[in-house]
Image (tube, rainbow, N blue to C red):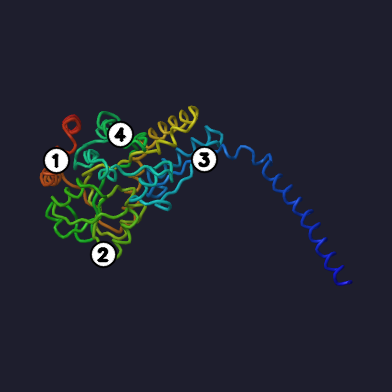
Amino acid sequence: MKTVAAICLFIFTGIVTAFVFGFDLNESQDSLQYDDEQEGIEDKVVIKFSHVVAENTPKGRAVRQFASLVHERTDGEIKVEIYPNGTLYNDQNEYDALINGHIQMIAPATSKLTERFPKWQVLDLPFAFPTYQAVEEAYEGTIGQTLIDQLGPKVKGITFWYNGYKQVTSSEEPMILPSDFNQTHLRIMPSPVIESQFHALGASTSQMPFNKTYSNLEVDFINGQENTLSNIYSKNLYKEQDYLTISNHGYLGYAVLMNDEFWSELSNEHQAIISQSIEETTDWIKRHSIEINDAHLRQIKRDDSLEVYYLTKEQRALWKEAVQPVYQVTEPIAGELLMEEVYRLQEKYQ
């Protein structure tokens, strides 16, 4: 009988304990749910901005500048989370991540849009834009607007950001004459124009993500590459190469893109702040990209790990002659309007 009583007492005590502590737990959860410190957290807007370059490059610094301006002007209501160096998405999958809403902003090199939007190849034409003023007029004029209009319905094209002219590095021999490319295997971005350009010069090419370039140079799968001085320096590509040719054979810039659905859901006030911050950041990168690349060239020279060559006017003419067939292939793809603008800018700034 005592055993039965003890069992009943145990069960009764358990029920009471569960009721008491269960009630306290619910009280605790309710307290957390309505904590004043948590109020409004659902209203925070997060922009995940993914890119593949280092933070000390023109683009890397521009993204930080943009994030700072947005945070300051929205009093923290919008937070720009920055994912540099391909830590979240690489340059092969970031566009799909954008249109699927996994991230909200990217700024890919314009070359990386050419497979989806063939008219963008016009920006890759060798020696297309002879001066920085020509690049600026291309980005901010008819060429830039026409290309932005080509983007799909899920993407909002915002603006163009600047980096610099591309140069060539090699571990075999200095790239001075077109014939010097015959034994060269270069890493390139996925662009039909860039591929045709180097094939015309006599090189073989491999397309690969930017962040795979160093490792492929290290194991000699490739023995050369083209890029801006800031990218060559920041990724230590120059340390795996013996020769750098300052060729200025093409310009590397970026298309700043946002998920269109995300943009449309922002308030008018937030849209205005983002637009203003983008405009100021674009002005900043336009002014500072040249000096950043120049500073990185000085660092490369100071390291003294490779030889630096500058093309003469005569050598440059030989390169131009060798790549001229690329224009003939690109003209029907880019169309008359864009090609006329290219030729006009070449004549104006030659």
Residue beneath the point at 37% across and 49% down = 53
Q: Which mark is residue 79?
A: 3
Q: Earlier in the sequence, mark 2 or mark 4?
A: 4
Q: What element carries label 4?
A: helix
- Closer mark to the observer between disc 2 and disc 1: 1
Q: Earlier in the sequence, mark 2 or mark 1?
A: 2
Is residue 350 visible in the rendered structure shown here?
no
Residue beneath the point at 66% across and 41% down = 37
Q: Which amino acid does label 4 sit on?
A: Ile
Q: Nearest the camera: 225 or 103?
A: 103
- Residue 307 vertical position relative to residue 143 in the rendered view, above or below: below
Question: Mark 2 to mark 4: distance in Å?
Answer: 38 Å
- Closer mark to the observer between disc 1 and disc 4: 4
Q: Where is the N terminus found, in terms of image quarters?
A: bottom right
The residue beneath circle 1 is 327
- Residue 317 vertical position relative to residue 18 in the rendered view, above or below: above
At which x and y percent is residue 254?
33, 41
| Few, some or many residues within 10 Å of mark 4 (<14, 14–19, 20+) | some
Question: Mark 1 to mark 4: distance in Å?
Answer: 22 Å
The residue beneath circle 4 is 148
Q: Is mark 1 on a helix, strand or loop?
A: helix
Q: Which mark is residue 220?
A: 2
At which x and y percent is residue 35?
69, 42
